[in-house]
Image (cartoon, rainbow, N blue to C red):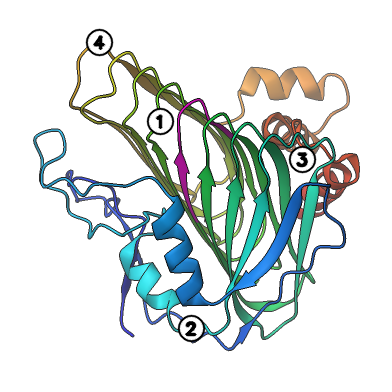
Amino acid sequence: MGAMKIGQIPSLTWNKLDINFASVDNPEKINTQMETRIESLPEGVTFQNLSVGEADRWIQEHAPAQPAENVIAGKRPIYHPQKFATGLGAEFEDYLKLAKGGTTLIETAENVKTDAPVTIDFDYQSGNRVFTRQIIHVSRNSSLTLILVFRSAKDAAGMAGIQTRVVLDEGADLALAGVQLLGNGFVHYDDLGAALKADAGMKLIQLELGAGKTYTGVHGELSGDRSVWDSRTGYLGQDAQVVDLSANLVQRGRKTRCEMKFNGVLDGAATKRLSDTIDFRRGSRGSYGHESEDVLLLGDDAVNKSLPVILCEEEDMEGSHGASIGRLDDDMLFYMASRGIDEKQAQQIMVRARLSAVAKDLPDENLKNEIHDFIEEAFR
């Protein structure tokens, strides 16, 4: 296939900076399917494999409807609506159809409260061009914590991708974390779509620290009244790395709440694009949405592109966004130097501080230590 558009914003804005979507030229052919392995599951949580057709039928039967409006906030949408929307979009979904293999369904029974997190490790070898599909279903009044870790050798090269579709029933809670520690020769795709019914809550932690090119897309549908979304994303770009992030949160239910925060560090000639949209649809009266980004620029040639958007079709709403972009302050560097901390060490301290603000909520101390070591290694 030719160029693939991914992570499109829901309605067109000025395009001079090429920020409305990401374009991937001639994406690599997928050569294998990675089997998901889970060593143990808490009581009340099940795991099964579905064919692609079975997975699509499951989504159709269980997910809330996502009506495709002809006009959004007075603008005509520029994306092709999917039956179940995901962050990277319809063209990526077409690309994913080339992948063989089925879909993993991780599902809870009703009224199940799990204490220990479930961790899935994805270990990639050089030359892998792999995609994994999964559905996560948390049933009524249940809770689940799931951690996904993507690893490879430091000098490995390949392509690693995952598509995750989440359905949260009434009163369900999901804490989902994705930690990407791939070698610089990898291209990483992470495509997420989530549908929240009434009183459901989702907490999302994303850490994109490795890979030469990263494309991460999130689409959340707060369909049910009083549903809550809370996401924290941390990213690190060095040398000529490409970090592409897109997030679109659609608030349909009454009194829904959305909070999105992004903390990032760009060094060398790294390039980053972030498009994040809060979309208040008709019927979402009394809802709240906030998005913010904090970027630290360490490299003179680093390129940062940010596009925060708020769309609104309702009254009685509260929406806000903000961004902070800057470099290490000379006064701070002087202060640290006076205490024997050189500029390189000061950079490490500031990078750790920003990314630790995202990692601190991970319920796995060993993984936190691994993240710490990965960042230390990156700045040696």
Residue type at mark 4 is Asp
Q: Secondary structure at mark 4?
A: loop
Dominant secondary structure of the residues highlighted in magenta in the image: strand
* Alpha-carbon span between mark 4 and mark 3: 48 Å
Q: Residues within 10 Å of mark 1 (few under 14, many from 20)?
A: many
* Of 311 and 166, the residue lying toward us: 166
Q: Is residue 277 left or right of residue 214?
A: left
The residue at 20%/14% (across/down) is 315
Q: Which mark is residue 344?
A: 3
**Residue contact at pointers 4 and 2, CB within 8 angstroms:** no
* Left or right: residue 135 compared with residue 323: right
Earlier along the polypeptide chain: callout 4 or callout 3?
4
Say whether residue 201 is magenta. Answer: yes
Q: CA distance from mark 3 to mark 1?
A: 48 Å
Q: Which residue is mark 1?
A: 224
Q: Split into 4 quadrants, where in the image is the N terminus?
A: bottom left
Q: Is residue 59 visible?
A: yes
Residue 356, disc: none
User: Where does residue 332 sit, x and y in percent of width and height?
Assistant: 69, 20
Please state the extent of the stretch shown in magenta in the rendering.
Answer: 192-202
Q: In the image, which is nearer the foreground, mark 1 or mark 2?
A: 1
Marks 4/2: CA–CA distance: 47 Å
Q: Earlier in the sequence, mark 1 or mark 2?
A: 2
State the mark number for residue 316.
4
Residue contact at pointers 4 and 1, CB within 8 angstroms: no
Q: What residue is pinned by disc 2?
A: 28
